[in-house]
Amino acid sequence: MFRRLLIANRGEVAARVLRTCKRLGIETVAVASRADREASWLEGVDIVVPLGPARAAESYLDADALIEVGLRHRCAAVHPGWGFLSENAVFARRCEAAGLTFVGPDPHHMGLMGDKAVARDTMAALGMPVIPGSDGEVDSLEEARELADRIGYPVLLKAVAGGGGRGMRGVDSADQLADAYRDATAEALASFGDGRLYLEKRIVDGRHVEVQILADGFGTCLHLGERECSVQRRHQKVVEEAPSPGLSPEERARVLPLVADVVRRSGYRNAGTVEMLLDADGSLYFMEMNTRLQVEHPVTEQVTGLDLVELQLRVAANQRLPLSQADIGVSGHALELRINAEDPAQGFRPGPGTVDKLHFPQGEGVRVDTHLAQGDRIPPDYDSMIAKLILSGPDRATVLERARQAVAATVIEGVPTNLDLHGAILRWQPFVSGNYHTKSLEQDLHLLVGGA
């Protein structure tokens, strides 16, 4: 195992990686931008290194500075967490060239899966079910129009280098295609520096289901069950749960082993998430693969009893996975609520500021992942997520009730939060029944949030 690790991230992400490192006895080096220098979570780090101004491009996205810190402090490895440089194949390649082990897949697979069109074609060639669409990118509006006419509307234009819903446009009819193509191309170019698009059939009332996988360098690839991520707003996840209430046991038994086998045959190594779409008929289709740990990984940890960060580190240290597929069991149910410093009643406007009062619940089946302490300042420069409430229990009904009690017991003063929205979601009939899809929250948002 590594003696010293650079955590190339901040906030809740860095605090999560730090927790596992401390348990394993790994020394930690963390970086802090000017906006984060006084953050309380840094108190648990062995070595804290100042890293540039608040602007992420000059701090947490500065690959040169991060590699220099890792080398200067004799780190053996770099854990990128999620976000920032976690899926940047160039950064991973540069770490490896400098003698720093990158905790994640090799740069080749990061690049392969980072191109959404190539990833789709690769997975299809290996036998993964994929949504009907283009073979690779579409080179022109005319090509997109021809393909859309052939597979039928509605369709979805998606950025090849995309993520988080940027560079994505739904198209219901032929007369909408030109504007959607133009807008998606412009947004993809602005967001990723890459305006290429691909096109696929849009599944109406689909559900977002993802499969957590782990693979080592010795030919073992495991699936750790699935997560449901369909409670979304503008393609951003709000609530996640495991297992999915919408996936049939038959489809689970059919597709999850296939996912693990396809990923194994691709040669992938370390943790990853295969994101899939569940259609109204109950069939799963491959969408994309994220070559990192996900924000929502704790729900998988709660139902499997595994520490995914530890397993990431062991694989990166060239150790065999210490378990087989037969050793992995999914027990009970888990739910994650993303707590953001934002005001849903004001169009979800971010609300940076100082946390004047902070209290999170404790008790059976309650886990809180956060980097905050009372008195901490939430800077305006980064993502607004400040904590995750993770609830687990023997069944979904028990978890829902624990979640309601946990939300009611949470106190965050000084900044606006989406806690009230979570309280409403936990009593919202489509969610309580488990009968919801990726558009359900947006369709009913006016009922759940006044003025949103």
Image: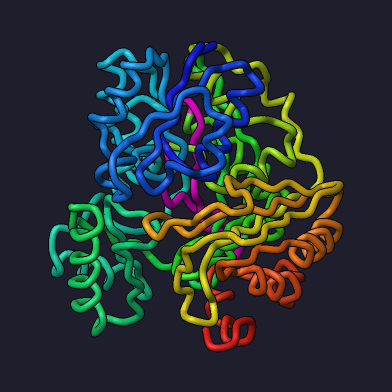
Q: The N terminus is located in which quarter?
A: top right
Q: Where residue 334 sits in the image (x, y, percent)?
A: 74, 50
In this rendering, is residue 451 above or below 25? below
For the rendered model, the colour scheme is: rainbow
**In front: 209, or 336?**
336
Total numbered circles: 0
Q: Where residue 164 sits in the image (x, y, percent)?
A: 40, 58
Q: Is residue 275 visible?
A: yes
Q: Residue at x 64, y 81 (%)?
A: 448
Q: Which residues are magenta?
A: 264-291
Asked where in the image residue 410 lies, by quadrant, the reply is: bottom right
Q: Is residue 274 magenta?
A: yes
Q: Is residue 268 visible?
A: no
Residue 144 is left or right of residue 47, and the answer is left
Asked where in the image residue 361 lies, by quadrant, the reply is: bottom right
Q: Residue at x 58, y 24 (%)?
A: 21
In this rendering, is residue 13 above or below 438? above
Q: Where residue 14 sits in the image (x, y, percent)?
A: 50, 37
Q: Residue at x 65, y 68 (%)?
A: 419
Q: Where residue 215 sits in the image (x, y, percent)?
A: 52, 25
In this rendering, is residue 422 above or below 392? below
In this rendering, is residue 321 above or below 337? above
Q: Is residue 351 magenta?
A: no
**In front: 123, or 19?**
19
**In front: 258, or 339?**
339
**In front: 387, or 440?**
387
Q: Residue at x 32, y 49 (%)?
A: 54
